[in-house]
Every structure is written in structure tokens, then in C-alpha cells.
Image (cartoon, rainbow, N blue to C red):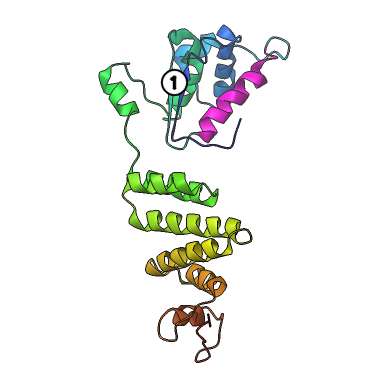
């Protein structure tokens, strides 16, 4: 599986379609060893048998991935409740799950829109991956102005880097736009780097940005000659 970590995960008939079937009851033996088993279900225990439960590990692996990759909620839906009962008894004993009836209220709960913070987090993830257009879109949907401008400036800078050799004049224009956006949102170091390559400095304006990051000593700025 990929490293992608979704907010919600749905497992549909995971236990019901598992080849282990009733052998999931071996979980009760584990619960008994951990003193988590209620006396009313002691009679349903199965002892672990390496030959009989040889596929247990392979069945636990996808379940482990689903549980650990989920960032917010793990939903499970089973058409038969007898197959999933051992694991649900274990999870309920640890106060990790809630049982819900599948109805319109549950459907609405599963369709809750991402919050602002979730959208921002996804936007920054896309930004780090260099997917600037999608990062801009994600920040726009979240109403996060700073993120929109940061992704836009980063996109302009990346385009300038690609066109630096084949189309230097166009690259300079893109880099100047990126620098102005970076400067406007307080990203002074990124702005200074763009201005440095653009090779155009103002004594009272943009040069102070470069100075603050040590690219040039104060009082020794020169406007580029054309």
C-alpha cells in the first residue's frame, strides 16, 4: 500500500469475507490472557493452533494497515455480526469503538466536510510534494489566503527555474513576480533569493530584504545596470 494516510477509512465486510470465519474467536484467548474477557463469553474461547490459524497473520496485516493509516475515523460495516463479534468485543472492552445503525444520520456523519485545519494540512503536504496547482486549489477551498499566495509564488519560482536557460527573460519576469508575492506575505528569505537571481535591488526597498538575510552587507547595494 502507498504511504497516503486518509482522514477516514471504510472496511466493508472485512470479517465476513475473511477465510478465518469463526476462527476469529481465537481473539478471546488473547483477551483471557490479558484479563479482558467477561465471564459470560468464557465458553467461546478457542486455543491458538499454529496449523488451524496459519492465515491469522496475513489477515491481521491489512487490518493493521487500516487502523494505523486512518487519521481520524475507521468505519466498519458488516452484513453478519457473528464474524466480527470477537474483534468488536475486544475493541469495546478497550473503549475504542461505538456501534451505530446504518441510516441517514450515519451517512451524513460520514460525509462531513474537511475542516479548515485539515484543508490547510493537505495544502502544505501538496506544497512539499511540488504539486503547486493542487496546493493552490486546496488552500482556496480552505479560504487560507497565505497558503494560496505561498503556493502561487512557489509555482512561479519553479517555472522560472525550468525556463532559466531556454527563456531567460521570461524566467526573470516569473522570478520577479514570485519575489513580490514572497515579500508581500513575509517570506523574506525566499524573496531575497528570487531578487538575488533577478539582479535588481533598490536601496530603500527590496535591498533591505536581502540585507536582513545577509546576502549583501548594508549600505552597499547597487541597482543593476541595463
Left or right: 69 in relation to 75: right
Left or right: 141 in relation to 74: left
Residue for point 54% across, 56% down: 158
Residue for point 60% across, 33% down: 2
- Residue at the limit of the structure toward the left, as seen here: 105
Q: Residues within 10 Å of mark 1 (few under 14, many from 20)?
A: some
- Residue at the limit of the structure toward the right, as seen here: 51
x, y (%) of residue 139? 38, 48
Q: Nearer the viewer, residue 116 or 55?
A: 116
x, y (%) of residue 26? 59, 15
x, y (%) of residue 190? 50, 67
Which image quadrant is residue 62 in? top right
Residue for point 32% across, 16% down: 102
Residue 222 belongs to the span the image colors magenta: no
The magenta segment: 53-69
What residue did someone put label 1 on? Answer: 76
Amino acid at each position: 500500500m502507498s504511504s497516503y494516510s486518509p482522514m477516514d477509512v471504510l472496511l466493508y465486510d472485512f470479517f465476513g469475507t475473511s477465510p478465518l470465519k469463526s476462527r476469529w474467536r481465537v481473539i478471546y484467548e488473547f483477551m483471557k490472557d490479558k484479563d479482558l474477557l467477561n465471564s459470560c463469553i468464557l465458553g467461546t474461547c478457542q486455543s491458538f493452533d499454529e496449523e488451524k490459524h496459519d492465515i491469522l497473520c496475513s489477515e491481521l496485516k491489512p487490518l493493521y494497515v487500516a487502523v494505523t493509516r486512518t487519521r481520524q475515523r475507521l468505519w466498519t460495516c458488516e452484513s453478519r455480526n457473528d464474524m466480527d463479534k470477537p474483534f468488536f468485543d475486544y475493541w469495546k472492552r478497550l473503549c475504542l469503538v461505538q456501534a451505530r445503525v446504518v441510516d441517514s444520520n450515519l451517512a451524513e456523519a460520514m460525509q462531513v466536510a474537511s475542516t479548515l485545519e485539515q484543508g490547510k494540512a493537505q495544502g502544505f503536504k501538496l506544497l512539499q510534494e511540488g504539486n503547486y496547482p493542487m496546493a493552490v486549489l486546496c488552500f482556496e477551498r480552505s479560504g487560507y489566503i497565505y497558503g494560496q499566495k505561498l503556493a502561487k509564488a512557489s509555482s512561479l519560482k519553479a517555472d522560472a527555474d525550468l525556463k532559466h536557460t531556454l527563456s531567460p527573460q521570461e524566467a526573470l519576469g516569473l522570478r520577479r513576480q514570485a519575489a513580490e508575492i514572497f515579500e508581500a506575505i513575509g517570506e523574506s528569505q525566499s524573496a531575497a533569493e528570487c531578487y538575488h537571481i533577478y539582479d535588481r535591488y533598490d536601496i530603500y526597498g527590496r535591498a533591505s530584504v536581502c540585507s536582513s538575510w545577509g546576502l549583501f552587507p548594508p549600505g552597499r547595494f547597487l541597482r543593476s545596470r541595463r
